[in-house]
Image (spheres, helix red, strand yellow):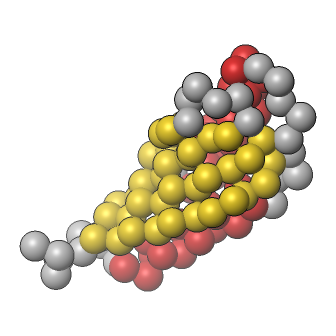
Amino acid sequence: MYVGALELDVLLGDVHSLKEKRSVVRPIVAELRRRFEVAAAEAGDQDLHRRALVGVACVAADHAHVVDVLERCERLVASRPEIELLSARTRIMGPEDD
């Protein structure tokens, strides 16, 4: 079993309140969940209205599948015109990580 985690640090465009931030971040999280069947959530920077940390997790039997899914998630977020992807960090744990 392999577990992958992806942290996406994003800068939101023309957002001036936490309410506007939610209206941008929630659809992104929902699309990640729906398209890739991953666990996804806003995982940090909740009190900043122009920044968000989106966390994505994936579990699979194959290391390559975890890598592929997380890379596609990153590309999806990076392609959104209303945000700028500042950084992406990936961690994968497998059977050899005891």
Q: Position of residue 47 (x, y in %)?
A: 58, 26
Q: Is residue 64 left or right of residue 50?
A: left
Name the quadrant containing residue 28.
top right
At 74% from the left and 47% from the top, the residue drawn is: 11
Tell me what residue is drawn at x 70 percent, y 29 percent: 49
55 sits to left or right of 15: left
Q: Nearer the viewer, residue 82 or 58?
A: 82
User: Is 90 above or below relative to 14?
Assistant: below
Q: Position of residue 48 (x, y in %)?
A: 64, 30
- Location of the N terminus by quadrant is bottom left
Answer with the quarter of the image where residue 91 lies.
Answer: bottom left
Residue 92 showing in the rendered view? yes
Hey, which residue is sitting farthest front in the picture? Answer: 48
Q: Position of residue 3 (x, y in %)?
A: 32, 64
Answer with the quarter of the image where residue 75 lies: bottom right
The answer to which of 32 and 88 lies nearer the viewer is: 88
Question: What residue is shown at x 83% (from left), y 24% (from top)?
Answer: 16
- Please name whichever residue, 33 or 78, is drawn nearer the observer in this view of the structure: 78
Percent across and percent down for residue 35 are 63, 52
Residue at x 81%, y 60% (from the top left corner): 79
Is residue 34 among what the camera can see?
Answer: no
Tell me how many marks there are.
0
Q: Please indicate whether residue 28 sits to the left or right of residue 58 in the image.
A: right
